[in-house]
Amino acid sequence: MPECAGAPDTLAPRCQALAASDLSGDRRDELVLLLENGPVSWMEAYELSESEAFGQQPVTVAPPGDLPDFAPGKPFVVHVGTDPLGSVTCRTTDTKQRQIIVSYSRVSDDHTTWQIHETVFVLDPGLNAPYAEVTVLTANDRTAPVNPSGGAPPVEGDTCPGM
């Protein structure tokens, strides 16, 4: 994969396959990579197409996206570092739709409140066939009190399958 390759004279990120997980609910796995370059960490999702003729293409963001982090037409990249604190969870609705929830959280200046931006996506492998796209369902800002004993802010959803 190009994101994991690097020439000897370039700074290639550390790259590991985090999971082959069915993020779309279509019973076919998508490949999730964890990439790290110094203190910066991010995850990228790749469609594992049925034909090797297409190779592994990054999952992209369908218009209109959710700016500034999820620009339309760009790869679906989730920053999972500590500033902002990034998390990825999943949930399945009553109608069996698999949703991916990305939360970015920061502590307020007075250290009493989490400021949380949540974006809910659906991965549609057929939207831009043969390449997959994520569509933004909702984007919300909310707050939650900081727990004085520490810990991450509350997030929606559960651990994504295989991750």
Image (tube, rainbow, N blue to C red):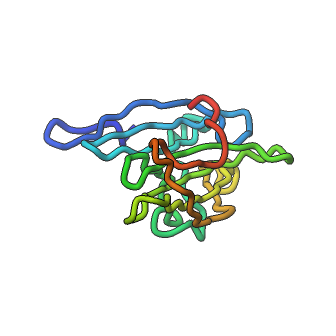
Image quadrant in which you'd find residue 119 = bottom right
Residue at the left extreme, as displayed: 9
Compared across the picture, whether 125 is left or right of 47 comes to: right
Above or below, 63 against 37 in this view is below
* Residue visible at 53% across and 30% down in the picture: 19
Above or below, 150 against 16 in this view is below
Q: Nearer the viewer, residue 114 or 96?
A: 114
Compared across the picture, whether 68 is left or right of 61 comes to: left
How many numbered discs?
0
Residue 121: horizontal and vertical position, in percent? 64, 55
Q: Nearer the viewer, residue 43 or 30?
A: 43
* Residue visible at 36% across and 53% down in the picture: 83
Residue 44: horizontal and vertical position, in percent? 47, 45
Image quadrant in which you'd find residue 128 = bottom right
Residue at the front extreme, as displayed: 148
Residue 71: horizontal and vertical position, in percent? 49, 66
Residue 94: horizontal and vertical position, in percent? 85, 46
Q: Nearer the viewer, residue 155 or 32?
A: 155
Q: Nearer the viewer, residue 100 or 152?
A: 152
* Residue visible at 60% across and 68% down in the picture: 63
Image quadrant in which you'd find residue 120 = bottom right
* Residue visible at 25% across and 40% down in the picture: 12
Q: Which quadrant of the figure contains the C terminus?
A: top right
Compared across the picture, whether 105 is left or right of 135 comes to: left
Q: Which quadrant of the figure contains the N terminus?
A: top left
